Image (cartoon, rainbow, N blue to C red):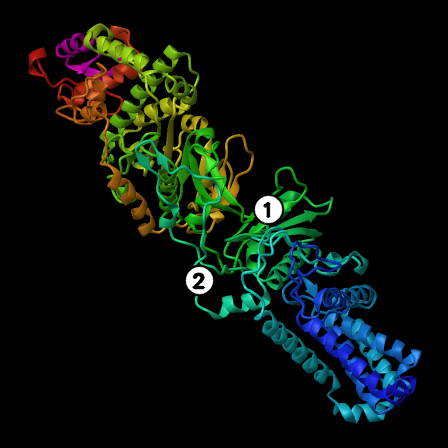
Amino acid sequence: MAGFVGRFQRDIKTIFWLAAGVFVALSLVSFYPQDPSFNSRGNITEIHNWAGIIGSYLADSLYQLFGISAWLLVIGLFWLAKNNLKNEIKFFSPARFLWGLLIVLSLSSLVSVYFRDQSLFKFHIPLGGSIGAASAKGLEKVFNKGGCSVILWTLLLLMVMFYTEKPLTKLIPRFGFSWRWKVYYFLGKLKKFTLAGAHYFFDEIKSSLSSSGVKEVTVPSFCGDQESYEPQFKMNPYGEKENANVPTPRQQLKLNLTSPQKKKVEVKAKVVRKVENWMLPDINQLEDPPESRVKISERELREKGNTLLEKLKQFSIFGTIVDIRPGPAVTMFEFKPNADVKISRIIDLADDISLALSSESVRIIAPIPGRDVVGIETSNSLREQVFFKEIVADDEFWDQKMTLPIVLGRAANGDTSIVELRKMPHLLVAGTTGSGKSVFLVSALTGLLVKHSPKTLRLILIDPKQVDLATFSQIPHLLMPPIVTPKKAVTALRWAIKEMEKRYRTMSKFGARGLEGFNQIVSEFNPDEIKNHEEQNQRLKQDPSTALEDYYYQPLPYIVIVVEEFGDLMAVDKNNVEHTVIRLAQMARACGIHLILAMQSPRRDVITGLIKTNIPGRISFKVASKMDSRIILDESGAERLLAQGDMLFLAPGVAKPERNHGAWIQEKEVESVTRFWMKQGEPDFDPVAMRVLEGSGSEYGDPQLDGHGEMDSEMMEGMADEKYDEILAYVSTMKEVSASLLQRKFRLGYPRAARLIEIFEEQGVVGPANGSKPRQVLVDSYNDR
């Protein structure tokens, strides 16, 4: 046996070196970052590497240490097999092994110098490996890039000479005086070969593999401070989580080559769709988002980070970028300035930074609340669409604590953004044409319809434009038909005040502090108790002296009042609209009535001080000027937003607004949800509200509730004044009259006297105003009016 081995010793060694080369090549070409290794401890039970777990550990170590230069080991093993077959055993000398190792190190360092921002397989593995990155970093600190290149090229040439034991005169002709470009060409071909081989092998792997719970491959700790070698920041890529499913490189390639596929979105939370006699809509009626997503490359982010640092240095502002947070529409660079930098200097550079980054818009948050960094938000070159279905499918939307969820979309870092209307408890929305305001209102209403039946939610829609909310005109959730005229809008708001007062009267009777507590109490009534309360209510209504003391004895729904173009209402009847809105905003929260007021231009005469004080929840889309932004948000910044859903949300009790990108919902999705509800029932309008809107509303004994007729509500309010007839008789005896005269004569307040003068003018009793002069009386007697 010994003689047989000795006889074929050279062939055995040749086969051994050849097999080792093939084994290493298979390990490298089928490398999968989520396979078990020194840098990945996932829960994947199936090994993707074609060389098994040993190949997985070997490939990961070689790529992490040497990057693409690890393929020199394959070349070296094949070269050993070739020379062993030729009986050239001199390649085993220790010196030659050292020269070969130095060739690998110098080549890895050169790759790191010239291909700093590129990585293998897009999995954050430096192209030159960790050792190459660390050595390049150390040399560049001393010699910069130019000197570092000279040193490494010199070292590489010397090591090649020592390894091959051939003089330079024989090496240069072999390279044809173009050795540097051939090295570039070789590296490029080698990278393409590696990726192509990986794609081929990964195509054989089952595409249904689940890789949940896998940690991201990271640079090992012994490789030095990789983040400081790269531009001085780290990245928190949008959408990447520890438990996310990581597609293989082959799957990623397919996403780019095939037509867009739809990503099936399903609700993970347990949803009870049947509520008494109503069925909630199935979110499968909504449009699925595409399978492939728009993502910004790391290289682009790093280039922007470097450009940002260079621009700030030009203005003597020094610091580091500690984090980058890409989102669907914007990317936030967290910049930590040095201690001697004034924050105000950074804020003034927004336009300069926008120019340097070629960004549509730049917004600066100085500082980020609770942090020692400045947030610099820049628009992405490619914006990702946020789909409504993926937001309502989130578990947070179906949380029991989220009673009235308002769908915002996604935050600047890509997280799902949903807010609770009850906690705000009212909302102001502003945005110019095309900013996404109307789409937000539609998505907010659709989100409420997805979660609530008419048993738990009723709506009052005020839409002077008669366009934006027209889709919801026939749903059974409506308390009254959509309001399209300002006068009826005032009447509807006054009806809401009366409803609020009745609810508070009811809750006081049962000792409840809020709507939830009241509903809990009355839901426990037995049939006899319900019958007793019903009989008591009938007796109260039959007696005129107690007609206003009736109460509710069954669970009450939430009421959400949505006003589109609130500015138009204020322009037509500011006093009455402001009075009713402020009254509701101050008191309606506990009884389950909430307001959403939307407008195009947040002027001071529209959003008055009292309205702002009582409505702390605010959303601003893109507005026309800094002044508009300060009115709605108490600070500038909204004028720098992007169009089509980019918004700033200011929650109650929060110092700085948060940036969100609104969810896009198509018209056919809204129609699908509304048709679903319309098939289950027709609108069940409140009879009292309908009588009020039709002009016969005396249910509460208050003429202010009349919607229209011969006289409007303000005129009837004035005629209901207890001194109306007395004052009118007095005025008819005068030639001139003024509000101050009535104020002194009848001891009235000025607003009351001025209102009566205006009513007299509408009735033709007095003439129009003439500056500060008294008004002329146009009638001769009381009967002439």
Residue lying at 86% horizontally and 88% vertically, measured from the top left = 8
Query: What secondary structure is found at the residue carrying circle 2?
Result: loop
Badge 2 crowding class, 10 Å Cα cut-off, few under 14, some 14 to 19, many 20 or more, is few
* Cα distance in 3D space between marks 2 and 1: 42 Å
Q: Secondary structure at mark 1?
A: helix
Q: Are marks 2 and 1 in contact (CB under 8 Å)?
A: no
Q: Is residue 394 left or right of residue 111?
A: left
Q: Is residue 205 magenta?
A: no
Q: In the figure, is residue 364 to the left or right of 283?
A: right
Q: Nearer the viewer, residue 395 or 256?
A: 395
What is the number of the mark on residue 261? 2
Q: Nearer the viewer, residue 151 or 291?
A: 291
Quadrant for residue 591, please give it.
Answer: top left
The mark that comes first in sequence, 2 or 1, is 2
Quick one: 389 or 25, which is closer to the camera? 25
Q: Is residue 464 shown to the viewer in this render?
A: no
45 sits to left or right of 228: left
Judged left or right of residue 318, residue 733 is: left
Q: From this viewpoint, is residue 17 visible?
A: yes
What amino acid type is highlighted by mark number 1?
Ile
The type of residue carrying mark 2 is Gln
Residue drawn at x 40%, y 34% is: 604
Q: Which range is magenta?
A: 717-743
Q: Height in image: 60 above or below 751?
A: below
Judge the density around disc 1: few (<14), some (14-19), many (≥20) Cα neighbours within 10 Å. some
Q: Which residue is mark 1?
A: 347
Residue 507 is drawn in which quadrant? top left
The picture places residue 575, in percent across and down from the top left corner, at 31, 25
Where is residue 92 shown, x and y percent of the image? 90, 81
